[in-house]
Image (cartoon, rainbow, N blue to C red):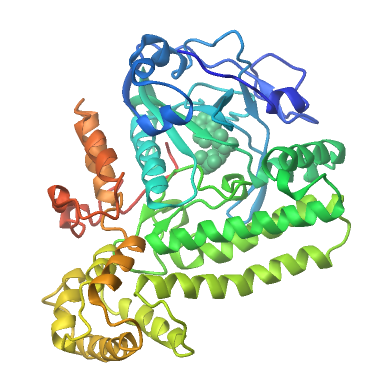
Amino acid sequence: MKLNLQDTFNKELPSDPIIENSRRQVSNACYSYVKPKKTKEPKLLHSSAEVQNLLGLTKEDAASDEFLQVFTGNKVFKEMQPYAMCYGGHQFGNWAGQLGDGRAINLGEVEHNNNSWALQLKGAGPTPYSRTADGLAVLRSSIREYLCSEAMFHLGVPTTRALSLSLSGDDVLRDILYNGNPAYEKGAIVTRVAPSFLRFGNYEIFAAREEITTLKTLIDYTINHFYKHLGKPSKQVYLDFFKEVADKTLDMIIHWQRVGFVHGVMNTDNMSILGLSIDYGPYGWLEGYDYNWTPNTTDRQNKRYRYGNQANMGLWNLLKLANAIYPLIEETAPLESVLESYKTDFEKKYHKMMCSKIGLENNFDTDGQLINELENTLHLTETDMTIFFRNLASISINDSSEAAYKKISDAFYDIPKTKENTKTKWLAWIESYLNRLKKETQNDSERKKQMNLVNPKYVLRNYMAQLAIDAADNSDYSLIDQFYQLLKKPYDEQPEFEKWFAKRPEWAKNKVGCSMLSCSS
Ligand code: AMP
Ligand code: MG
């Protein structure tokens, strides 16, 4: 196996002079060198052929023992200088100080076809940033990260990727519900791949510690490598950089809203500087369309990171990033103006995205109202988001309101209990919708085709991930591959997989891992 390693992060940025792998505060350094922990009995469970390709690896490479050893941290090529990054973050609204890669170890950067990819092992042992934890990851959270990052990519959502999922062979102790019932689980390692894993928190830590030289070095590095088109770093370029990060962050969140993805932990240490979805922890997918839904049990009280609040939280996080880069700009007005434009851009982009979901191409003044009413009506009874939008596409412009209602009401969770009043409201909405559609192209099949390109038929439903996990706990890894294949073409009909185009089953309603997820991973 040959990897074209061309490191820049650990070549161009200041490192922690201490080599010993002890937990500590690290100052004036972007990372610490650290070796992955050897594992007892590693076993490859899955590897993404697409990501192998990105890195210039072949199927044969992926089948080799060397691949397994390298991507579980057991073999480190002599050209590799693995490291853990130093970052801080605001967690649930509060400054948490130094966090850092507590269980992620970067192997280096691979260049292939003029693209550069950072490779990172997640769950490969402790680092100086592990604080009180063990640096390991369990199988359940690793399956969730592996499957979801690839699924998100195929949905067209900016995301980090995943090369491999392996068992470590070691057991890991976790208290899933934080209720004093720890138990051993299978340990696992995911190899993540992205142009960079830099987060807002990487900049915040230096601003918080007033390590301005290091802050500038890191921002200049980021611009030179990932925002090169902006030009040579200068005060104006820093502002342009901030504007572009804001745009990318917003675009990513609009995609989340489009597909019904709820990240669950939008802390600033989980916000990528490249606008990629990163750190798949207690995330979830909307079943019923519900602004207030969050999968994260730790956030049940305040619901800070609920579906309907993700764009606001993106803005909040950008404000923290603005504060972090302020020392290089020393003027608040231009930073504030970027944040202001995020709000107006959100209105426009969100509107455009929702129009595309309901098959409207042209813009009419009244569409805002139509969309508002749709969202209100969707909240009247638990309505499966994915099924609703998919079925909406089968409505014909010549349907009666009753006929159209019949098509969408399949998405209701409790059809027999749906109130008369709800039906009346739906019929009213459908009537305005059908009238509105008459002002578009009159071609049902073309509209359906366009709608099906933005409304996925298949997403990694919460209960599906849990089924894959339950099977894997019993050493059956076949569902991982089945879902991986299914989710490669989320917008295609794939009739052979029809059974996954289904509402959440009753058993999953209140099951841990399905509707309730904890950060314990
Ligand atoms: P997260 O909530 O997963 O984004 O993690 C927040 C911080 O805790 C990051 O610095 C992680 O690296 C760290 N962390 C999470 N889980 C572990 C673990 N098992 N061992 C060490 N550090 C961890
Ligand atoms: Mg994180």
The residue depicted at 25 percent of the width and 66 percent of the height is 390
Image point (19%, 28%), residue name: 476
Indicate whether 390 appears above or below 492.
below
- Point out the quarter of the image occupied by ligand 2: top right
Residue sitting nearer the eye, 180 or 406: 406
Look at 33% across and 63% down and name the residue there.
Answer: 455
| Residue closest to the eye, 76 or 284 | 76
Q: Position of residue 8 (x, y in %)?
A: 69, 26
Q: Quadrant of residue 378?
A: bottom left
Where does the image place residue 373, in percent across and percent down from the top left? 37, 85
Figure check: 243 above or below 28? below
Residue 501 is drawn in which quadrant? bottom left
Q: Quadrant of the C terminus?
A: top left
Q: In which quadrant of the rendered view does residue 219 lie?
A: top right
Is 437 left or right of 21, judged from the image as shown?
left
Q: Position of residue 356 (x, y in %)?
A: 40, 71
Question: 292 left or right of 461?
Answer: right
